[in-house]
Amino acid sequence: MRTSAFVPVLLFALLGALVGCSGGTELTYSGPEEAYKKGVAEMEEGDHQQAIRFFRAVFEYGRGNEWAPDARFKLAMAQRGLNKHLVAANEFQRFTQLYRNDELLPRAEFERANSYYLRSPSYRLDQSDSEQAISLFRLFIDRHPNHELVPEAEEKINELRAKLARKKYEAGRLYEQRDMWQAATTVYERAFDQYPDTPWADDALLGAVRTYIRYADRSVESKQAERYQKAIENYNRLTQLFPESTLLGRAEDLYSEAREKLDRAQAQQGEQSLAQEDASSGSN
């Protein structure tokens, strides 16, 4: 009997506690303007979660009310304040879909791209967010070429492209360390071709020079000359495009090696051709 009497009392106490908690967090506002202003105040105080609740309350009065566009934009910024960058990106996208004629549209497009920029990880990890940020920043620039945020967008594109170039370059280094010479030459050349305007472009060309020499060293005689020649071609690109590069000293040593080995390979090919001609003449 004690147990049966105790359980209802305990349940009643728990229920009372829950009601008290929900009542303590209940929002109070007289309309969309007050809800919006209270949301802004909460953001300024650093309570982004509470701010989000107030901004969402603005939409109870319809998406077309006077305060709804600003509330939608602030809602996205509040999500960013919670480091929910993908949620913020989605909110900025909703803004652009709902308020095509609002003066905040360009800023919303920029901030959507910026959300993916903030998600961009170390170059060692998957770079899908970096690529998405670049795409969206470029779209922003195309649509609003005279906007004040264009220089910042261009700066962030350059930063992200440098990260992508580093990732590609490091892949070439990994192949090189594993003595996978053909793969290394391909990746180094691709790193330069895709990111010629990044700080890693001259490193990629030097890598191509170096690995083509090693690739040729390990090739059959009939393929050596063309691969030493590829090393020289990449050296020429390096010196022509980056005459001030700090890598030119190392590149010159590699060029001398490639030139010497190319001359030797071509001489051997010439001797073999003569021997084949002599053998052919003798048989006739």
Image (cartoon, rainbow, N blue to C red):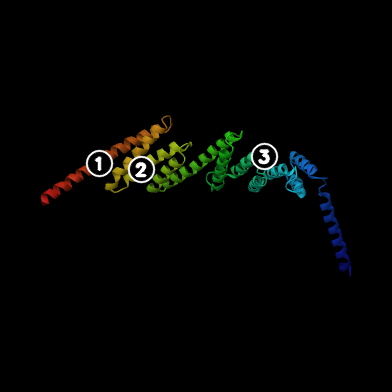
Q: Residue furthest front?
A: 101
- Residue that mark 2 sits on: 212
- Residue that mark 1 sits on: 266
Residue 182 locus on image (x, y percent) = 37, 48
Q: How many labels does the image show?
A: 3
Residue 205 at least partly seen: yes
N-terminal label among 3 and 2: 3
Measure how far apart labels 3 and 2 are at the Cα level: 52 Å
Secondary structure state at the residue bearing disc 3: loop
What amino acid type should be assigned to the residue bearing mark 3?
Leu
Q: Please indicate whether residue 94 sits to the left or right of residue 53 in the image.
A: left
Measure how far apart labels 2 and 1 are at the Cα level: 16 Å
What amino acid type should be assigned to the residue bearing mark 2?
Tyr
Secondary structure state at the residue bearing disc 1: helix
N-terminal label among 2 and 1: 2
| Quarter of the image where one finds residue 271 | top left
Secondary structure state at the residue bearing disc 2: helix
- Residue that mark 3 sits on: 104
N-terminal label among 3 and 1: 3
Residue 2 locus on image (x, y percent) = 89, 67
Viewer-closest of 91 and 96: 96
Viewer-closest of 120 and 265: 120
Residue 272 locus on image (x, y percent) = 20, 46
Viewer-closest of 147 and 5: 147
What amino acid type should be assigned to the residue bearing mark 1?
Gln
Residue drawn at x 43%, y 41% is: 193
Of the numbered discs in the image, which one, if any, rests on residue 173? none
Q: Residue furthest top?
A: 244
Dot 1 alpha-carbon crowd within 10 angstroms: few under 14, some 14 to 19, many 20 or more: some
Q: Which residue lies furthest to the bottom in this view?
A: 1
